[in-house]
Image (cartoon, grey):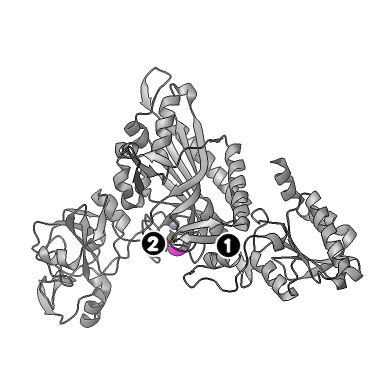
């Protein structure tokens, strides 16, 4: 490809709202173009990267027996009503009505549709197992699209569904897919961490995420360096730090003028936050819920949602709290009635807490559970913190940030039972098909690759992902000798199967070198009147500092040898 003919132009400046490295570099390198919030066009260079990723995914999934198919984006909403997920997805689901008044949605995922399909294809245990997948555009109306391709509303995704006769067979499919995922991320040169995850709106039980470690990642991973335990903070368990256990004292009201937050109250009374109880109010499916938790901990809304088994959970407004006769900033679980109270088990780790008095400017000392108040439910609903104990080995936990690149779930029979996908087993008994669901966000993987592979000058693509393998930079295009030699090299490399981006513009060397670095093409070749004098060209790898002069006659051979493994894979396709 000649740069003079390429659609996109590079930019010196990233857009002001680009807050992650990958977003800045994708826009500056002309790989993507934002249409509206969270919706992007992939420009020719970005599209080539995306296709490389798709191809790697396809090859690895086909190796473990995946069968590729293609389902529609438009899905009947009735199917979603059957599984109840039109509710659990809520406003993230794009819905529409066709001219006949039929309700449809744009697929954010395809469990419903594929289960309906398999229901009509599978009769007996002999038709199983199946690994069915597609690479297709998905839609989710995210409340806050961000980070360029990291959180978007329309995105390319590989989604695979496994269908098995029983739990053991599901385990085999699950392990096959874990292997395939590992191979995919290895081939993309992306180190990932496999972590335990919450299964969220998808439903089902066991689930794991594959995280690319990056400071810009939206997900917090809690992990143990001692035994290897790792989980998304949404799901992570921990052994909480214990509080002080003293003889129980009597309740005592204390003035806390103007003090509302836990920090203010703890500072004012000169006690640690661990010595306080915090009240947080939520509205769960329309009902007000009082949540009590030790003051040094945070409520984990995913754990809370799972505990309440509700579909909609939001923090309650101050107005709603007042309407219930409670004083925000000094709410107390003592003497409360007519409202559901949920508590984190941390309220048992400590004694003589300071809690609200349900009276402005006052708190109560020496509050103890269960002596002074009762709760409807007590369980772990706190976010695990670094420094707490590992749930497996009790060593200290640490945390890091990551980008979720892939997700795998054991759905078991949740969908097959609701949609009615049954089969006859060896004994002629009717059983629901046992399912799993597996996804890789391809666009997000592209962004994650940049988050892990860049420097101050631009992107540093791993060879298998790069849009082109060679950036051929001809300096002095007004020199007929240089032009002729560069054209010959360009043609020779292409014949060998090397993808070359030929910078044939009459720009200054500075502009060309900056673009070469920004675009992150793995090998840069420079041909100039100076190199031509010695019948050579300069070769430099994007991820190395030093460059070297190589005779023109050896160049093509040398490059195709250096990247022969890669070329071979490409030619085998
Ligand atoms: Zn551990």
Q: Quick one: which residue is furthest to the front in this view?
A: 99
User: SS at mark 1?
Assistant: helix
- The quarter of the rendered structure image containing the N terminus is bottom right
Magenta range is 392-400
Q: Position of residue 66 (x, y in %)?
A: 55, 36
**From the Cβ of disc 2, is ligand 1 less than 8 Å away?**
no
Instruction: Rate crowding at label 2 as few (under 14), some (14 to 19) or many (20 or more) other CA atoms within 10 Å.
Output: few
Q: Which residue is mark 2?
A: 144
Q: Is residue 372 above or below residue 410?
A: below
**Residue 203: x, y in percent?**
35, 44
In percent of the image, x 38 and y 37: which residue is there?
112
Q: Nearer the viewer, residue 296 or 462?
A: 462
Among all residues in the image, which is located at the extreme top?
428
Q: Does the image show residue 298? A: yes
Q: Is residue 399 magenta?
A: yes
The quadrant in which residue 335 appears is bottom left
Residue 450: image tag: 1
The furthest residue to the right: 534
Residue 382 in percent (x, y) is at 30, 60
Indicate the quadrant of ligand 1 in the picture. Answer: bottom left
- Say whether residue 493 is left or right of residue 130: right
User: Tag 2 or tag 1, which sits nearer the N-term?
Assistant: 2
For mark 1, does the 10 Å Cα neighbourhood hold few (<14), some (14 to 19), or many (20 or more) residues? many
Q: What is the x, y in percent for residue 65?
A: 57, 34
């Amino acid at each position: 490809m000649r740069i003079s003919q390429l659609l996109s132009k590079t930019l010196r400046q990233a857009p002001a709202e680009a807050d992650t490295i990958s977003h800045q570099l994708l826009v500056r390198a002309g790989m993507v173009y934002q249409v509206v919030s969270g919706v992007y066009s992939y420009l020719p260079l970005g599209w080539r990267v995306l296709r490389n990723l798709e191809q790697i995914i396809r090859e690895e999934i086909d190796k473990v027996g995946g069968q590729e198919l293609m389902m529609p984006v438009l899905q009947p909403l009735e199917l979603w009503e059957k599984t109840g997920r039109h509710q659990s997805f809520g406003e993230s689901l794009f819905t529409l009505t066709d001219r006949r008044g039929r309700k449809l949605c744009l697929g954010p995922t395809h469990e419903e549709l594929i289960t309906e399909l398999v229901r009509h294809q599978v009769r007996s245990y002999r038709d199983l197992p199946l690994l069915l997948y597609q690479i297709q555009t998905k839609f989710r109306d995210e409340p806050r699209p961000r980070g360029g391709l990291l959180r978007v509303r329309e995105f390319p995704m590989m989604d695979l569904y496994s269908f098995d006769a029983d739990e053991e067979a599901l385990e085999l499919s699950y392990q096959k897919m874990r292997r395939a995922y590992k191979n995919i991320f290895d081939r993309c040169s992306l180190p990932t961490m496999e972590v335990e995850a919450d299964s969220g709106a998808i439903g089902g039980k066991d689930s794991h995420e594959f995280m690319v470690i990056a400071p810009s990642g939206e997900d917090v991973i809690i992990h143990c360096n001692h035994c290897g335990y790792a989980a998304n903070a949404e799901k992570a368990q921990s052994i909480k730090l214990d509080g002080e256990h003293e003889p129980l004292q009597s309740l005592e009201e204390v003035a806390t003028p103007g003090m509302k937050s836990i920090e203010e109250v703890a500072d004012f009374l000169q006690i640690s936050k661990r010595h306080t109880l915090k009240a947080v109010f939520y509205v769960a499916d329309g009902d007000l819920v009082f949540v009590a938790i030790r003051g040094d901990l945070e409520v984990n809304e995913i754990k809370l949602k799972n505990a309440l088994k509700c579909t909609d959970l939001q923090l309650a407004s101050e107005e709603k709290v007042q309407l219930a006769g409670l004083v925000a900033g000094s709410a107390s679980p003592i003497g409360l009635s007519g409202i559901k109270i949920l508590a984190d088990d941390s309220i048992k780790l400590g004694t003589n807490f300071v809690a609200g008095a349900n009276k402005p400017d006052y708190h109560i000392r020496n509050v103890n559970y269960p002596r002074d108040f009762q709760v409807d439910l007590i369980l772990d609903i706190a976010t695990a913190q670094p420094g707490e104990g590992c749930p497996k080995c009790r060593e200290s936990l640490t945390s890091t940030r990551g980008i979720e690149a892939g997700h795998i779930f054991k759905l078991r029979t949740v969908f097959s039972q609701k949609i009615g996908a049954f089969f006859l087993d060896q004994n002629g008994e009717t059983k629901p098909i046992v399912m799993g669901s597996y996804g890789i966000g391809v666009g997000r993987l592209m962004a994650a690759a940049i988050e892990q592979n860049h420097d101050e000058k631009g992107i540093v693509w791993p060879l298998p992902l790069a849009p082109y393998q060679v950036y051929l930079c001809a300096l002095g295009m007004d020199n007929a000798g240089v032009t002729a030699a560069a054209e010959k090299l360009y043609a020779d490399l292409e014949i060998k199967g090397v993808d070359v981006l030929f910078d044939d513009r009459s720009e200054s060397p500075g502009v060309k070198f900056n673009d070469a670095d920004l675009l992150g093409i793995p090998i840069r070749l420079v041909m100039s009147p100076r190199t031509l004098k010695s019948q050579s060209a300069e070769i430099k790898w994007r991820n190395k500092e030093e460059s070297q002069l190589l005779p023109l006659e050896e160049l093509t051979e040398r490059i195709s040898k250096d990247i022969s493994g890669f070329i071979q894979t490409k030619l085998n396709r």
